[in-house]
Amino acid sequence: MPRIRIHFSKRGYASFISHMDLPALFSRAAARAGLRMERTNGFSPHPRLALCPPLPVGVEGLSEPADFWFVEWEPGSRDAWNRSLPDGIGISSAVPVDGVSLNKLCSAASYIVTPLGGASPRDVTGVIETTLRENGALLDVSASGDEVLVSSSDLERCGPSRMVKDLVSARLISGWGDLHMVRAAVGRWDPDGMRVIPLTEECPL
């Protein structure tokens, strides 16, 4: 049975769909599109899939990877699946894969952080750099115009929630409403190119 790796975006109001609701959302859309997903064994079988590390509600994702197992996969399956998804969710690529599991490949992420509440990008950069460096998760951070560009490892402990918590502690923001945050890419870190390589590209293992 083919294992299909997709990259999808979650934008606008769709960013408020929780990570826990995504399996049902994608599997129901697949069923509406006439696609048959492989199901797990056991007392309560459910569609077989693997998602990337979760995003907090309200954080947009531009290229989120996920693996789905189908009974069969044909040309045109991605387009049919896309047409059944709600506004704000879109599949940009869908390719058969095998080998290393998704979770082992998702070791780095890049973010675009835009302060909205008056904090300067330079000050935000300083706090994020300090906290990620202290936790050994800093890969790269810089201010570019009104935005702060961040790349980090340890996605579970040093993701958006940790950044927001430390910015609140530093009294630069009062909460999530003072920032717009986007996860631009998830994959593996390329130290030569100083960027996160999406899983659709060749990844060093």
Image: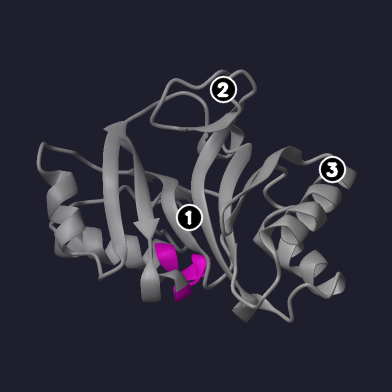
For label 1, the residue is: 42
**Distance CA(mark 1)–CA(mark 3):** 43 Å
Q: Image quadrant for the N terminus?
A: top left
Q: Are marks 3 and 2 in contact (CB under 8 Å)?
A: no
Q: Where residue 175 sits in the image (x, y, percent)?
A: 70, 79
For label 3, the residue is: 133
Please name which of the two marks, 1 or 3, marks the residue nearer to the observer.
Answer: 3
In the drawing, does residue 96 fall left or right of residue 123? Answer: left
Labelled disc at residue 193: 2
- Outermost residue toward the left? 76
Given residues 57 and 139, the one toward you in this image is 139
Q: Are marks 2 and 1 in contact (CB under 8 Å)?
A: no
Q: Are marks 1 and 3 in contact (CB under 8 Å)?
A: no
Q: Image quadrant for the C terminus?
A: top right
Please name which of the two marks, 2 or 1, marks the residue nearer to the observer.
Answer: 2
Mark earlier in primary sequence (1, 3): 1
Residue shown at the point (77%, 54%) measured from the top left: 128
